[in-house]
Image: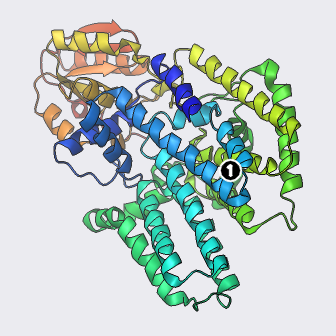
Amino acid sequence: MLIAAGWKLIFLVWDKFPFNSDEAIVALMARHILVGAKPLFFYGQSYMGSLDAWFVAAGFFVFGQHVWVIRMVQTLLYLGVVTTTIWITYLITGSKKSAIASGIFLTIPTINVTLYTTVSLGGYNEALFIGNILVILAIEIRRKFQQGVKKSGWLWLVLLWGLFSGLGLWANALTLIYAIPSSIYLIWIWIKYRDKHTEKIRPFPTLIVILVGFLVGSTPFWVHGFQNGWDSLFKELLGSAIAIENGGFIQRAIYHIRNFILLGIPVVFGIRPPWEIRWLALPLIPFFLIAWGWLLWGMSKKNHFGPDFTAEKRLLAGIGTTLIVAFLCTSFGIDPSGRYFIPLYIIAAISIGLIFEKANKTIYSICVCIILVFNLATTFQCAAKDPPAITTQFYAPSIVDHSYDQELIEFLTQEGEYYGYTNYWVSYPLAFQTAEELIYTPRLPYHTNLSYTERDDRYTPYRQLVSQSECPAYITTGQTELETYLRKSFDSLGVTWKEESIGDYHVFYHLSRTVHPSDIGLGVNRN
């Protein structure tokens, strides 16, 4: 646990995780919670509940409103993931050696896992933690049934399983990849033990208990649906927010398969960073592949379809299978990053632990060490390339060098430019870092072709403040086409202005009259 926390601390102290806009929105939500707001979902969308923001708000309440507090909360949540992973391995094997092996494998994970369990994007650590809890509860329910414990001994576990499955649906729909296989596992438990239990297990009352727990846990999900309508709620659950594909289902599925093979598998194993396509630690890859090959052979030997392939191992396989099928069949399959594949690494950690269940496996220990060394080398390699450092941005035009943020803030404050317009990747980090003194709404495009979606503008109160301001400034981030467009538009309106470049930022300020993006054909959907 200390190693896992210390590993993250190295790169946090080194300041290698840029503070990007998605994380800034979580931070702003947490700040607003402390003054009485009660957001149910990530601002501007109907998926990824606000559970992460509530945790961060608790951290802000104790330690103050700082970026490092967000990362501390994520680190604590990841330690919870490590703990529950160890617990799962021990429940399956009863071996401390196996449990420790699983934990060690998570201390220095791939760059993908390190990134998305350190930086907050709205609930990935929560999804992993809740998913592990669902697996633990399902296995514990089976153990109670095996022992013939009275109804009171297992009914609370059933209730908790329903509660956490509902909570997961709201917090991050990624937990469905755990809930679906574990629900099938629970059905198998009922079929297997219904006539062997000391008390007859009736399916209907059990289902009612699960449903009650589920509804309680997912209450914010349903409240949001009643308040804002159901259409967007269920569409976004299946990835409509990133559904920008054309063609039929088969064509899209083939494209997703290609993404999984060419982009997904390399990021799962950690041989490429999630934000770009390049090989990491190239000289070490042959040794790394041999180590993984040996471990996979050991897993297949240990978990072949026979007596050793227990129901619990089928449950783990079901989680991995559900994740892959969901990626291939939904709009999430267009995402080239590796954030949706983090559960596969957790399953791998448990599977590796199973290899150590009995005999002393020296060769497997060496393989694990090789993988950890590879992960260490690739993480340092990514951190050393700054910018972008260890970033969540996988689209080049959205990558901004935030090392100039403080200089930008000082300039805007000195010039009295407290309100204005910019793009999504500048707006919210600027607002949080200035305690919402500098409000720049994202009504400008960041795509090179000037395409824009109004979805970028996620917080209505900011929009209202800027629309009422006089002579708002404009901030761009290296978009030559947009800067040329702004100059021509200002000229056509007879507006005078000044310009200043600060790192990746280019500021148009001291406009002679008020110009809103809508006045010059910007800030509207142009996809």
The relative height of residue 486 versus residue 79 in the rendered view (above or below) is: above
- In percent of the image, x 86 and y 41: which residue is there? 361
The relative height of residue 60 versus residue 84 in the rendered view (above or below) is: above
- In percent of the image, x 86 and y 26: which residue is there? 286
The image quadrant where one finds the N terminus is: top right
**Left or right of 13 on screen, residue 146:** right
The type of colouring in the image is: rainbow
**Left or right of 32 on screen, residue 184:** right
Question: Tag 1: Cα neighbours inside 10 Å, few (<14), some, or many (≥20)?
Answer: many
Across and down, in percent, residue 36 comes to 16, 47
Across and down, in percent, residue 228 comes to 28, 62
Would you identify the image quadrant in which residue 400 lies? top left
The relative height of residue 180 versus residue 254 in the rendered view (above or below) is: below
Q: Can you identify the residue that label 1 sits on?
A: 347
Q: Amino acid at mark 1?
A: Ile
**Left or right of 345 on screen, residue 152:** left
Across and down, in percent, residue 99 comes to 68, 48
The relative height of residue 443 versus residue 430 in the rendered view (above or below) is: below
- Label 1 SS: helix
The image quadrant where one finds the C terminus is: top left
Residue 327 in sight: yes
Would you identify the image quadrant in which residue 285 lies? top right
Across and down, in percent, residue 456 comes to 35, 39
Residue 230 in sight: no
Q: How many marks?
A: 1
Would you identify the image quadrant in which residue 406 lies? top left
- In percent of the image, x 56 and y 53: which residue is there? 331
